[in-house]
């Protein structure tokens, strides 16, 4: 596949052409993804300067170089981690607070993304170079464009997180570097003269809190149409006269963000039109389809202390350390002595993740089902196979991983009579309120949870539920997985699950690979055996583990 990007009059478009014949099957098997351009690779100082001459950009020019599938996946997952951190911190903290800044600074450092220019260039450089960070920032943005242009909800989420990320990075630039960014991107705003500033001095001082004449003197003011700064007009932070607002340089980010939002929105719409052609590439299609709800945290399917949870402990643990989704499933199983397939998969893999062995799982499900309308013989014939299959002992021997929060929220929504899913996402607010009341959550806590649910922050609502039920102010982690909830709860309570260690699944883990793969084979429908292809949806979650 050849991706050629053109940026004309603020428009981004992709031209998709077949791969050249020289990309042979042997090259496909190496897992190399080729982004060909009119020039084979980035060469020349002028072109490099144009793309990566500044630590911040509008992403106006698409990538025009070769990139391996391994790097493609790594860049995509790490930017997704960054955007999810931006989302979580934006709801949990005031965006101008020290806590917000400190936590986001740490994430930038951990993931090696650029966000500010170092004050002292003489300091010894460690880790990736600034050029490599900027290249990663550039390419990863465009990869996620492909993944998040598919639906209106995905586009809205992506735009909001990218805007929050851009705002943070722009505001942390030195004023000199901000001006350089405006110049590089041809953002020319009319600066009022010193004479006009003096004439409006009193008005400009009174338009903002804690602004003095000295403050007005040393910074530039821009005169722009009021519709370009509606956020500032709405909050009465600027002087408005004759349809124009006078914006101090410190607030110029508001206008820049409006421009960025407009460009990105148009670019996503245009990318969506070309997506069917892009998805025809058998190497990209599964990756792009699953990036939008990929889990990027630890893997809870492999444990060093498996078997530490006994069957007698399940009931008390469900009341103390289960997330609401699993507590709902456990209660439904105890009440009706049955769960439908979606519930059995979600709850069964969770139990596997907290330490139940295959024998324990068979005993647990059999003892509960025989209390209902299923006798032991029917259970062995109709249900035992699926439990052994879940543990990788039947069929294709796939070691299934417990469902992440994103998978529970976005896939297989429950229908009438189902117990699975995310209560914060799939329950009626009034029913959710009643359920929280029955679990002794305080009225103020319920209000906080429902407010987060209203804003579609379902994982943060679950994290707030964790804090309220464990009587802590700040959980100190970002919740992404039901088994993570259980582990963190056991750490606090010092229970039997506290010592259960979790490994990170790596790509070379034989439990997650089809038999006898090529040493350089990249997972995907095009190079998996036919019998494994049907399981690609389940197995793809393992590609996005934090290695």
Image: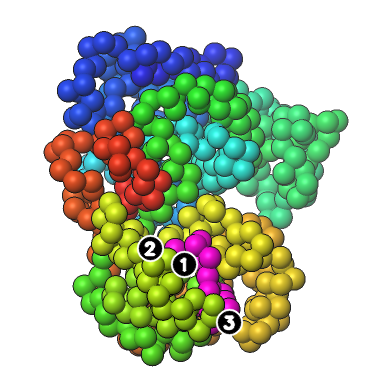
* Quarter of image, res 476: bottom left
Q: Does 67 lie within the magenta span?
A: no
Q: Residues within 10 Å of mark 3 (few under 14, many from 20)?
A: few
> In this picture, which residue range is highlighted in magenta?
328-345
Residue 63: x and y, percent? 38, 24
Residue for badge 3: 335
* Quarter of image, res 157: top right
Q: Which numbered disc, 1 or 2, marks the residue closer to the eye?
A: 2
Residue for badge 2: 386
Query: Looking at the image, which residue is at 15% across and 43% down?
Result: 516
- When the figure is inspected, residue 102 is found, relative to residue 267, above or below; the finding is below
- When the figure is inspected, residue 36 is found, relative to residue 211, above or below; the finding is above
Residue 492 left/right relative to 68: right
Which residue reaches farthest right? 242
Residue 356: x and y, percent? 32, 76
Task: Out of 38 and 329, give the one closest to the viewer.
Answer: 329
Residue 49 left/right relative to 256: left
């Amino acid at each position: 596949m050849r991706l050629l990007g053109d940026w004309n009059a603020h428009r981004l478009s992709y031209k998709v052409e077949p791969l050249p014949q020289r990309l042979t099957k042997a090259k496909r098997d190496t897992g190399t993804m080729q982004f060909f351009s009119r020039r084979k690779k980035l060469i020349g100082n002028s072109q490099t300067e144009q793309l990566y001459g500044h630590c911040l950009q509008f992403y106006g020019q698409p990538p025009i170089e070769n990139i391996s599938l391994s790097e493609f996946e790594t860049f995509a997952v790490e930017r997704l981690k960054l955007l999810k951190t931006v989302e979580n911190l934006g709801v949990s903290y005031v965006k101008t607070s020290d806590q917000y800044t400190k936590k986001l600074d740490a994430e930038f450092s951990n993931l090696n993304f650029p966000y500010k220019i170092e004050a002292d260039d003489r300091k010894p450089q460690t880790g990736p170079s600034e050029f490599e960070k900027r290249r990663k920032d550039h390419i990863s943005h465009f990869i996620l464009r492909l993944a998040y242009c598919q639906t209106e909800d995905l586009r809205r989420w992506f735009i909001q997180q990218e805007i929050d990320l851009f705002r943070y990075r722009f505001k942390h630039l030195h004023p000199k570097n901000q001006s350089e960014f405006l110049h590089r991107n041809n953002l020319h705003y009319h600066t009022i003269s010193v004479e006009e500033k003096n004439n409006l001095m009193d008005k400009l001082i009174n338009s903002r809190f804690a602004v003095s004449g000295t403050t007005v003197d040393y910074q530039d003011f821009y005169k722009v149409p009021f519709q370009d700064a509606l956020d500032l007009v709405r909050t009465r932070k600027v002087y408005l006269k004759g349809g124009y607002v006078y914006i101090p340089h410190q607030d110029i980010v508001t206008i820049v963000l409006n421009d960025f939002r407009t460009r990105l929105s148009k670019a996503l719409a245009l990318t969506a039109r070309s997506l069917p052609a892009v998805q025809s590439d058998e190497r990209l299609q599964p990756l792009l389809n699953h990036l939008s709800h990929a889990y990027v945290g630890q893997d809870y399917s492999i444990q060093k202390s498996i078997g530490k949870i006994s069957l007698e402990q399940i009931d008390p643990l469900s009341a103390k350390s289960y997330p609401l989704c699993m507590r709902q499933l456990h209660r439904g199983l105890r009440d009706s002595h049955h769960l439908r397939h979606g519930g059995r998969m979600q709850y069964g893999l969770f139990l596997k993740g907290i330490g139940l062995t295959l024998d324990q799982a068979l005993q647990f499900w059999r003892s509960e089902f025989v209390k209902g309308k299923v006798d032991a013989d029917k259970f062995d014939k109709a249900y035992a196979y699926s439990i052994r299959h879940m543990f990788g002992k039947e069929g294709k021997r796939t070691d299934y991983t417990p469902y992440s929060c994103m998978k529970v929220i976005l896939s297989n929504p429950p229908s009438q009579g189902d117990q699975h899913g995310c209560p914060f996402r799939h329950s009626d607010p009034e029913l959710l309120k009643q359920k929280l009341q029955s679990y002794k959550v305080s009225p103020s806590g319920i209000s906080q949870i429902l407010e987060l649910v209203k804003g579609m922050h379902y994982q943060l609502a679950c994290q707030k539920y964790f804090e309220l039920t464990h009587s802590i102010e700040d959980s100190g982690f970002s919740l992404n997985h039901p088994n993570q909830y259980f582990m963190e709860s056991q750490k606090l309570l010092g229970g039997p699950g506290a010592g259960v260690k979790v490994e990170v699944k790596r790509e070379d883990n034989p439990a997650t690979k089809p038999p006898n793969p090529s040493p350089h084979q990249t997972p995907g429908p095009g190079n998996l055996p036919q019998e494994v292809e049907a399981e690609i949806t389940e197995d793809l979650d393992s590609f996005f583990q934090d290695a």
